[in-house]
Amino acid sequence: MVIAACGGDPDLTADAGGPDAAPLPPLPADTAPCTDYARWPDALASARLPVLVHYRGGFEAAVAAEVLADVERAWDVEVGRLGFRPPLPDAGRCGPDDRLDVFLWAGIEECYVDVVGEDPTTPHDDEYAYVVIDPFGPFAGPILDTTVAHELNHALQAADDWDDAAIAYEMTAVFVEDEVVDADDQYLDQVVDFQAHPDWSIDRDDGYETWFMYGAALYLRFVRDRYFAGDAAFIGEVWRRLRSPLGSAEPDVEDALDAVLAPRGAGFVASVPEFARWRVYTGARADGAHLEEAAAMAAPARLATVAGAVGGQVALAPMTLGSAYVDVTGPAVGTARVAVELRGADPDVRWVVQVVPGAAGDGDVLAVGAGPVVIDLAQPRTLVVTALPRGADDVDDRTDDRHAATLVITPR
Ligand SMILES: [Ca+2]
Ligand SMILES: [Ca+2]
Ligand SMILES: [Ca+2]
Ligand SMILES: [Ca+2]
C-alpha cells in the first residue's frame, strides 16, 4: 500500500519554483528511491535524529535544510508529545543506513510514504517506511511544513500497522499536522467535504474521491476536546492499540478508540451521536464551546429546512453512523411548538433523534420511540437523526447501505 497523500490542498498553494528551475534534469518516473538513492547526490543529516534528507545539488540545498527543520519539529511533537513510535531503523533496506530517508523529488508534484518490508522479529505488521516530497510542488510553498508533518506521521503509522482501516491513516495525519503547525489550518478545506456528506458513515472509505477521509480529522478533534481536555496525546495510544498480528485486521482503529475511550465512560459508537451534535456548532453557529477553530469550519449540509408553522415530512436515508440534519424555523413573532416523530424507521439500525440546541444544554435526545415529542421554537432548532448499528460493530463490515425513515414535523 502506498499512501499517496499530501497534507495540503493544492488549490490553495502557489508553485514555489517548479521543476524547470532546478539545475538537474527531472528524475525518471521509474526511479526507485530506496535503491536508486545515488541519483540524489546530496544528503543532509539531522544532528540529533535518525533522519537523512536526500536532495540534488545546490539549488535544493536551502529547501533541504527547510525540510529537515520541518521533520525535526514534527518529530518532536509527534513522537515526543503525542507518543507515536519512531520509524523502524531500516538497516539500509532504504538508503545507505538505518536512518529514515526523506527524498526531495522535484517535479513529481505529489508526496507519499511507502514501505520496503516488514520487521519479522515483531508479531505485528510494522513496516520500514520512507518519505517522498516534491519541495516545489503544489503541496509545498507556504504549507511545506504542514505537508512534512503529515507525511512524517504516515511514516510513524507504518511502525505500528500498515494495514488498518483506510480512514485511520488520513484522519490521523490531518489531525496531527494541525498539532504541529496550528496556524496553517489548511485542513479546513478538507472539513468542507466531510461536512458536505453527513449522511455517510463517519468512517467511510470513499476511495479518495473526495477529501472526506481527511476531513474526518474533525472526529478526532472532537475526541480530543470532549474527552481529553484538549490533549491530543491519546492519538499515539490509539495507534499503539491498533497494532494487529500479521494477516489480521483486528484490532482496528475503532477497537483502539473504544479502548482509550473506555476509561472516560465512552466508546466509539456511543460517541457518534454527541459528535453529530457538535458538528452543528460550526460556522455561524460556532459558540466557542464546541470544536476549536469551529467558526472557520463548514457547517454540516442540511437535508431540509421546515417552517414550524407549516410542518413537513422529510425522507431520510443515512448510512450506518451517518446523520441527517434538518433545520426547523419558528415564526417571526411569538413562540411556536411542533411535534417531532420518526415514522417507517428501518429496524435494522438504532435511531437517535436529537434537537440542537436543547432546552438547557447543547442538545437533547428526543424519545421518539414512545410517540411524538413536542419542542418549542423559541430559537431556531436543528433536528439531528443518526443511524447507529445494532449489536456488534466493525469498520470492516461497513457498507454503503442506506437506512430509510421519515421525519414528521407537525405544528402544535
Ligand atoms: Ca535508511
Ligand atoms: Ca512485525
Ligand atoms: Ca489550527
Ligand atoms: Ca489494526
Image (cartoon, rainbow, N blue to C red):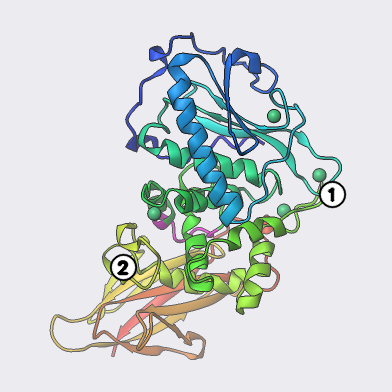
- Which residue is labeled 1 in the image? 123
Secondary element type, mark 2: loop
**Residue sticking out furthest to the front:** 47
Q: Quadrant of ligand 2?
A: top right
Tell me what residue is drawn at x 59 percent, y 34 percent.
47
Residue under pointer 2: 286
Residue 235 lies left or right of residue 218; in this view the side is right
Q: Report if residue 400 is visible in the image.
A: no
Q: Is residue 331 above or below residue 57?
A: below
Name the mark nearer the viewer: 2 or 1.
1
Element under disc 1:
loop
Report the quarter where the N terminus lies: top right
Vertical order, 365 against 68 (above or below): below
Which residue reaches farthest right?
A: 121
Q: Residue at x 77, y 30 (%)?
A: 91
Please give the count of numbered marks on the rendered protein: 2
Tell me which corner region of the image, top left, top right, bottom left or bottom right, holds residue 93: top right
Q: Amino acid at mark 1?
A: Pro
Q: Is residue 196 magenta?
A: yes
Residue drawn where x is 44% and y is 39% of the image: 145
Of 412 and 331, nearer the camera is: 331
Q: Residue 287 at what x, y percent from top left? A: 31, 72
Q: Main secondary structure of the magenta part?
A: loop
Q: Amino acid at mark 2?
A: Ala
| x and y, in percent, of residue 357 in the image | 34, 80
Query: What is the span of residues highlighted in magenta in the rendered image?
Result: 195-202
Is 167 in front, or is 397?
167
